Amino acid sequence: MESDVTKGHFIESIIKEDIKNNKNSGKVVTRFPPEPNGYLHIGHAKSICLNFNMANKFNGKCNLRFDDSNPTKEKQTYIDSIKSTVNWLGFEFGTALFASDYFDRLHDFAVELIKKDKAYVCSLTADNIREYRGTLTQPGKDSPYRERSVAENLSLFTQMKNGEFGEGEHTLRAKIDMKSPNINLRDPIIYRVKKASHPRTGLQWCIYPMYDFTHCLSDALEGITHSLCSLEFEDHRPLYDWTLDQLETPCHPQQIEFARMNINYTILSKRKLQRLVEENHVQGWDDPRLPTLEGMKRRGYTPESIRNFCNIIGVSKKESRIDMGLLESCLRDDLNEKAPRVMGVLRPLKIIIENYPEGRTEELAAKNHPQKKNMGTRNITFSRKIYVEQDDFMENPPRKFFRLGPGREVRLRYAYLITCKDVIKDESGNVKELICTYDPATRGGNAPDGRKVKGTIHWVNANDCIDAEVRLYDRLFKDENPEQDKQDFIENLNPKSLEKIESCKLEKSLSNAEPENVYQFERLGYFCLDSKDRDSKNQVSKDTPVFNRTVTMRDAWAKLYKKR
């Protein structure tokens, strides 16, 4: 995946300088450390690509390590999904690691801090701890339990470990500086009582380490050289370094921060995504409208397009908001190269070709890709009755409308030139079907007399097609910044983010479509078979398949919304 790591950035420069100076003996070891309390989203993809690409580029190693130190929020299903998603993106991580692998070591480190009088057991309530901490403009004040003796702290911590206290009765806090201008250094909690079963260790523990304590020590135990994390952890770096400076650890990793990904018309907060799921604004974590990687995969996004997007946006220290159109452009570029072409009619209008022999069916050759001969051709069938798009006919067409109208001639893709002779309407005056004629001499779409026909439309054989439901997805939110003006982001949900179209007609070759294989429906966009039809008890319907629109042919959406 060399093409994925072509764009240099400041972190790459730091690593190159470290290698030049033989820091860490020239080794590069990174890690991607998700908490298994939800599904990964496109923002995580940036971190995954950065950490794995830096390790790959400098012949190093990247660990996948789960920060599983909060048993009440973590589930095995999230662990399995994260592993699968990292692999799907194209990265190998060997054996997955877990913070819980180090629970014994972390406990010993906590005891070591107590013995050095660098940690103490505090009996303040959570509210009292917040009160004593102070504010960004006012210093905190010492806990009345700060000067407990080492012996008392060791005894209390042992009792905490043995389950003799309830949740919230005691915490273990680092003893640093309650007057520090950095609020993270004001005696942070490093252990708390939590009586819950852990997905991996069960009920073995009833105390669990906090993230800031766990993270830096896990890095050190794994020999991480460059701990790459988002800018929100920049203020936590002094605590990261302080913890490692107090203890005898195998190494002291370097924490480096970079700007998180922010994309317009969406949100990347796991907590807010969870609200969308739990309040049924979307149909689960893998809803194709969500920026979760499970949802994007189901919609038809390719790993290559996501990796290319992460490479294009680069890595910096400055927060910015990225246009969703760039992500979709990366997807179009990838799919344009690899997606086979097929024909499908979403809103069918029946055409009877009155001079085509009844009962006759003929095969026509259609290219699977106009520029790639190696993708070959396929056979499609043609008969007296076909379907075209309703939008490809107008009873009173304007001057520059080059598709079907009364008396007008158009080219059927791969087939013949046809002319509309009559319009059949229902009792309400709606167009029901068209009566057309075809020119037998124009097989393949070219007139032997050289007459020019500007319009070319797609179609399917009404006697040899499959019925399908198609789902058209749009932006999940109406506004570029769903959280603008501090309003509830739910108020910005786009009521037209999903449109379901039933009774679509697709060429028969799509009866063999597989989930995640994306096709270009000619003139309409890119589509893939849904891997989880939620209207059929979470299974793909055998009789009526569901196809998701992955992305449109071009970004007409942006132009539309600029007019609002």
Image (cartoon, helix red, strand yellow):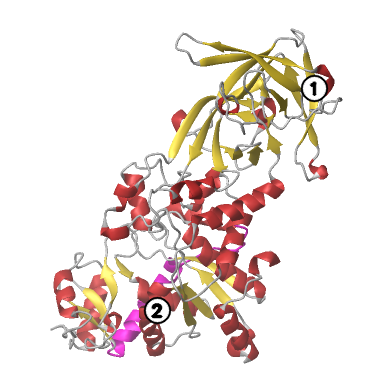
Question: Does residue 220 lie above or below 95 as drawn?
Answer: below
Instruction: Residue at 68% x, 43% y: name it.
Output: 339
Instruction: Residue at 66% x, 70% y: name it.
Output: 6
Tell me, for residue 363, which label it has, or none.
Answer: 1
Badge 1: how crowded within 10 Å, few (<14), some, or many (20+)? few
Residue 7: percent from the left, percent from the top? 63, 72
Q: Is residue 178 left or right of residue 32?
A: left
Question: Does residue 31 lie above or below 117 as drawn?
Answer: above
Please state which of residues 313 and 14 is positioned toward the viewer in this rendering: 313
Tell me, for residue 412, which label it has, or none.
Answer: none
Assign a secondary structure to mark 2: helix
The residue range painted magenta reads: 88-117
Please state which of residues 97 and 267 is positioned toward the viewer in this rendering: 267
Residues at marks 2 and 1, CA–CA distance in whole angstroms = 65 Å
Residue 87: percent from the left, percent from the top? 59, 56
Answer with the quarter of the image where residue 310 lies.
bottom right
User: Is residue 373 visible to us here?
Assistant: yes
Mark 2 is on which residue type?
Glu
Answer with the quarter of the image where residue 101 lies.
bottom left
Tell me, for residue 234, which label it has, or none.
Answer: 2
Mark 1 is on which residue type?
Glu
Extreme-front residue of the structure: 399
Residue 543: percent from the left, percent from the top? 56, 23
Q: Is residue 269 left or right of residue 223?
A: left
Secondary structure mainly formed by the magenta segment:
helix
Question: Which quarter of the image is occupied by the N terminus?
Answer: bottom right
Question: Is 111 a magenta residue?
Answer: yes
Badge 2: how crowded within 10 Å, few (<14), some, or many (20+)? some
Question: Does residue 70 lie above or below 448 as drawn?
Answer: below
**Tag 2 and tag 1, C-beta contact below 8 Å:** no
Question: Does residue 370 lie above or below 346 as drawn?
Answer: below
